[in-house]
Image (tube, grey):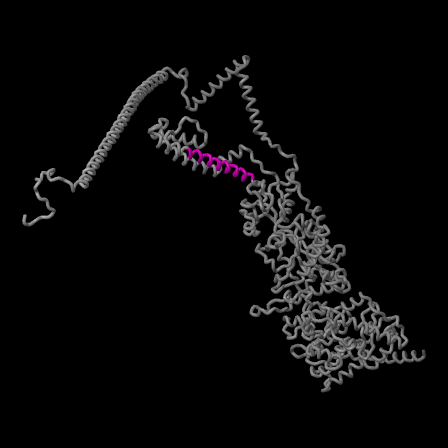
Amino acid sequence: MKRIILVAVIVAAQLAGVHSSCRSPLTPEEGFSCTNEVANAIRSRPAGDWWTLSTDEPQFIPGIDWVKKYFQCCRHCVWSLEYPTTAPIAAMVSDDLNCVEFRASFLEYDVNEDQRLSEEELDRYLQSGPNAYLVGNDLLDKNSVFVQCDLNSDGSISLEEYFVLRHFWATMHLTRTGPLTPPRDGKPMKDGPFGGFFLDFGQLQVWFDLVQTYLLEQYWDNFWDTSLIRVPTEDELTDTVRRMDLDGSTRVSLEEHYFRVFADRDGDGQVSNSEYYLSLYKKINQAGQRDNPYLYPINFNIHDWDGSGGISFLERKFIAADLDSNAQLDGKEWFLGDFPSDFGPFEGHATPASDEDPTPVVNALRYFYYTLYHECAQQGLKEYKTSLADYPWSRSCIIDVLIQNSPPFVMVEEDTSPLPCGRAFCNSSRAEESLGHVCETDDDCVSGRACTYYGYCHDIADIAPNGRQFARKRRYVRNGAPTGYDIEVFKEAFSRLKYNYTFTVVNDLSLDAAQAPTPYEGVSMTLALSSEFNQLRYTSATETPIDMSKYACSSRLWRRDGFVVVVRAELETLSNQIAMLQMLISPSFINFLALFFFFVLILGHIFWFFERHVNGLFRLFYAEGVMDGLWFAVVTVTTVGYGDKVPITGFGRLVGAFWMLFGLICFGLFGGQVISQISEMQSANNIVDIDSVAGVDVGVLASSNYRGLSTMYGFSPEICDTIEQCGSDVRSKKLKAMLMPHADVLRYFKSSGLENTECGNPLKVVGEPLLADNDKFGLHNSVCGCDKCDKPLAGSSVYAAVYLTQALDSVLGEMASERWLDGQDEAFLSPPVLADACDPKTQFDIPLIIACCVTLAFYVALSYFVSHSLTKPHADAWAKRIQDSLRETAFKLGIKHRRRRYLADQEQEEIQEDAQSAWREVYRHEKIAQYVSRLQSLCMGHNVDVKKLEAEVHQGRGTMSRVIRFFTTSGAVVLCLVCVVYTALIIVWGSQIRPSELGIPDGAKITSSLDPEL
């Protein structure tokens, strides 16, 4: 016991003699100035007792915290196991964890004794011990090790950088193994990220096991309390590795190790200005001068390019990965820098280097969006202790959601009252009015207050608690809390995801309002919650189409989204009288009459022409005979057949038969056309889905792709500027139907009050929603964000939009399977009452029936009035009065002349003379007509006799002609027979003719030749 006390006293005296520079170093070199005596003194005590070695520390402090507070210069001599979080176990065991040996090995490798190691000198270290095995088996790239160890990029390794190397790589020295996770691409480990110079989960697990073993041996040999040493739980091990893995890549690099253990001295996750200039990072500017950390912290500002006053690890990682220092990362640098693909592929963040160079690179702006997404997701991993598969997002990363009042999907009670104060009044110091002070910048608020992104002055203590500024964004402060179907679905989904969000109400929402966040804004993402068709497809200002491929959108919040067919709710009924009237004035009927008239006219002429001479029913005179033909053609074609006129010629009967068949066919086709037209008049009743609108005039929005819709479904598009215009045309029967976005239809029903009209909504939706999965047509109720929208700055690209919309999709799928969405349908989107909610109308034509009954009753009463003995005198009197009244009216109108008793004597004489003259003229005309009629009768009789005689003459002439032809033919035949007989006799009897029969003497010599002597 005395020996232990003596050692403690000696150690305390040694520690007390250490210079204060170790406790509060002023230079990077002092941060690693731990002497061998101090290091050995700390190693001689268990970590739980280190706090007793300080005379000014009255209570217990965990070992690693004690080193950070009192002996920062010895931090490279101590390794923390990170668990338990309240008092992490510290280790200084084994020769591989002895920082005293680090200095000696550095001096051994420093051949030229310049206190720096060149790449060749560092190669001596890499060719020794287990490093030689890793290098020889292509598991470690020597050049990558040198580049990563050269933290200040000066081309050499200082003693302090070597300490960092040995502190980081002590894990490999203790475990005697490199990373245990093989590369996914099958390439050698040295060609992968960091050249194989990193720690993975398997290697760290072995490290923890070995350190536990060495600590137990050390504590047992020194009779220390071994209960302070224990194996980590699975959660502790996972959390420890996650804290070490700053970028979520599952690989711990030297950069991450140095940033977390050495550079970030206060452990707030950022390197401040003072911490930066105490670090080993670069401090020489481009002019070759050392930075002035107070006036011109050039290198610090290069790292802190978001101007937050602190350097995050991702900001440092960009500088470290930029091997050629051109302020942008190409694909190779991105790969070697180990940017995890879980936070988006390189292509998802890259942009062409320039207009002339299409090489994809990640510049500073694109990297800002990457860090924004990465930090929010990575912080969410730590907050919720989950994996990226669960889409974590830090609650400190506020998501601003733009909405617009659009019932029933988004309903906001807008406050249109004047603002409570002007800018001057915003400088009021009364605390009770702090929320009522509108502002645009912090300058509009008094001291101690700042302008929130809600647009109101507020206490800084509430805005930035504990000195850490939180994101601020305007929202629906002056309006009531929004509600509606989309709002409730969105709130439930983000509640399940544990996202922090705020709503901003805008008056004219469009997709291009979901711009990428800009630095210093304080908002991680801006999303647009769309509930109308045009909001996703056209800008609010210029109404130009939006390229939706540049935005990432979630799936439909409302599962019945898409295009729907809207028709009149009440079935269209067409009375017979209206149908007949419409048919009579219809173009088809008029065209049929015109064509039928010409057919009848032609056939009437044909019948008259062939029947006029032989059929007395068709008069010879053209004007009269043609009318007979037309009458017969009309009666025959209509299949009436009065029988007053019939053809008697064969040709006339043949044409009549065909004409009757033509009439049957013609009127059959016409009847079918009439039925078809009546059906067309009632075609609206047949529209039950999209397949029923083929050939129908359908109203569509001018902003929709109506040409594509009409091509797909075969209807005739009627363009409407607004859905209200189309709805009015459908209700007034100008259109049979309209094809509209389903969400816009419900909004139209709600805003126009149609769903609350008496007897229900006069319009209804038929069929199922169409094109619901087609982003070009069916996506209306969704949440979208900027993916590659190039707004507000050219090159703006936020892969986080893809991440957040995918997260929303995953939750929406769960909500749909749980039928949670169905409950919201019933709450906000209950189907409206249709027009048949009232008592159905009777099928009887009540006005027509009443008119008929009234007319019948009138004539029955009139008949009784004029025939009954009691009322007949009165009826005759009334009839006489009415007759006189009508006659007087005719006199006044000049239709009739007055009776003579109303005229003077002279007028009566003149009228009598005129009447006698008229009678004489009439008598003369009648006599002339009689004479003409008689003459015509005589002429007609004479004509008949002449025609008969002419017929007899023709008949006699024909008979004589036939007799002459008979005798002529007979004589010719007889003559031919005689000639034939005579010729035959000559032939037969010619050689036996007697001379005496020919008058030749009997003694005459007959010869056949001529004798010249004779």
The answer to whether residue 151 of the structure is visible from this angle is no
**Number of residue marks:** 0
Residue 292 pos. (x, y %):
70, 76
Q: Quadrant of the N terminus?
A: bottom right
Residue 246 image offset from top left, x and y in percent: 73, 69
In depth, the one of 723 and 71 nearer the eye is 723
Furthest toward the top, the residue is 869
- Residue nearer the viewer, 523 or 637: 637
Residue found at the far left of this picture: 1013
Which residue is situated farthest in the bottom direction here?
112
Q: Quadrant of residue 938?
A: top left
In the picture, residue 70 is in which quadrant?
bottom right
Q: Is residue 980 above or below residue 822?
A: above
- The secondary structure that most of the magenta stretch takes on is helix
Left or right: 177 as drawn, with respect to 882:
right
- Give the residue at x 72% y 67%: 248
Q: Residue 135's x, y, as percent?
A: 71, 79
| Residue interval drawn in magenta | 657-682
